[in-house]
Image: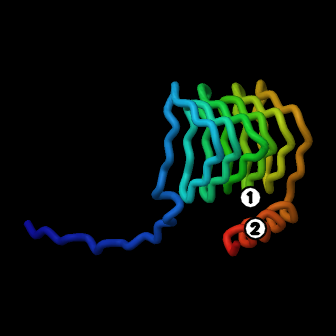
């Protein structure tokens, strides 16, 4: 029997998907957070959140601040802030959002609570990309 090794397939990995910041249940952070990768919130954040990757707020997670911004945002818990998602914002059935929302795509499941105004569409995403590029340049 002859064994041949399969050629190694190189995959391009987005560095933003490699880094994960985790706020565990029972943890509470007061102050602004800026993360270059992804963020998962099981605890509480009281402050502004700017993430270059994705944010997931679990059922036990809470974010209270003026603004929350990321590429994609998934909410199972509570967020009281103005939300900006360059691509998609999804509020799951047990999620609650209190604040205005700007995203290319907005998905609100049955049972979710959303109180605020929404701005969606491709033009919105283009504006957000320009704003994020300008922030990085400063």
Q: Is residue 6 above or below residue 48?
A: below
At numbered mark 2, what does the secondary structure look like: helix, strand or loop? helix
**Residue 90 sits in quarter:** top right
In the rendered structure, the answer to whether residue 58 lies left or right of residue 21 reads right
Q: Residues within 10 Å of mark 1 (few under 14, many from 20)?
A: many
In the rendered structure, the answer to whether residue 13 lies left or right of residue 56 reads left
**Gap between marks 1 and 2, in whole Å?**
7 Å
Q: Position of residue 91 (x, y in %)?
A: 73, 37
**Residue lying farthest to the right in this orientation:** 117
**Residue lying farthest to the left in this orientation:** 1
Along the viewing direction, whichever of 10 and 89 lies nearer the viewer: 89
Residue at x 49%, y 65% (from the top left corner): 15
In the rendered structure, the answer to whether residue 42 lies left or right of residue 118 reads left
The quadrant in which the N terminus is found is bottom left
Residue at x 67%, y 47% (from the top left corner): 49
Instruction: Read off the residue under disc 2.
Output: 129
Residue 30: mark in rendering: none
Q: How is the image coloured?
A: rainbow
Along the viewing direction, whichever of 77 and 24 lies nearer the viewer: 24
Q: Position of residue 136 (x, y in %)?
A: 67, 70
Q: Is residue 97 above or below residue 107?
A: above
**Residue 107 sits in quarter:** top right
Instruction: Read off the residue under disc 1.
Output: 86
The quadrant in which the C terminus is found is bottom right
Along the viewing direction, whichever of 31 and 93 lies nearer the viewer: 31
């Amino acid at each position: 029997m002859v064994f041949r090794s399969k050629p190694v397939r190189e995959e391009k990995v987005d560095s933003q998907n490699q880094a994960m910041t985790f706020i565990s249940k029972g943890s509470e952070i007061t102050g602004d957070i800026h993360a270059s990768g992804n963020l998962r919130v099981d605890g509480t954040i009281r402050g502004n959140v700017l993430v270059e990757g994705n944010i997931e707020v679990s059922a036990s997670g809470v974010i209270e601040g003026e603004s929350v911004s990321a590429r994609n945002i998934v909410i199972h818990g509570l967020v009281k802030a103005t939300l900006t998602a360059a691509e998609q914002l999804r509020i799951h059935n047990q999620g609650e959002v209190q604040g205005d929302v700007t995203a290319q795509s907005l998905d609100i499941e049955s049972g979710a609570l959303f109180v605020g105004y929404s701005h969606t569409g491709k033009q919105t995403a283009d504006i957000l990309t320009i704003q994020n590029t300008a922030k990085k340049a400063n």
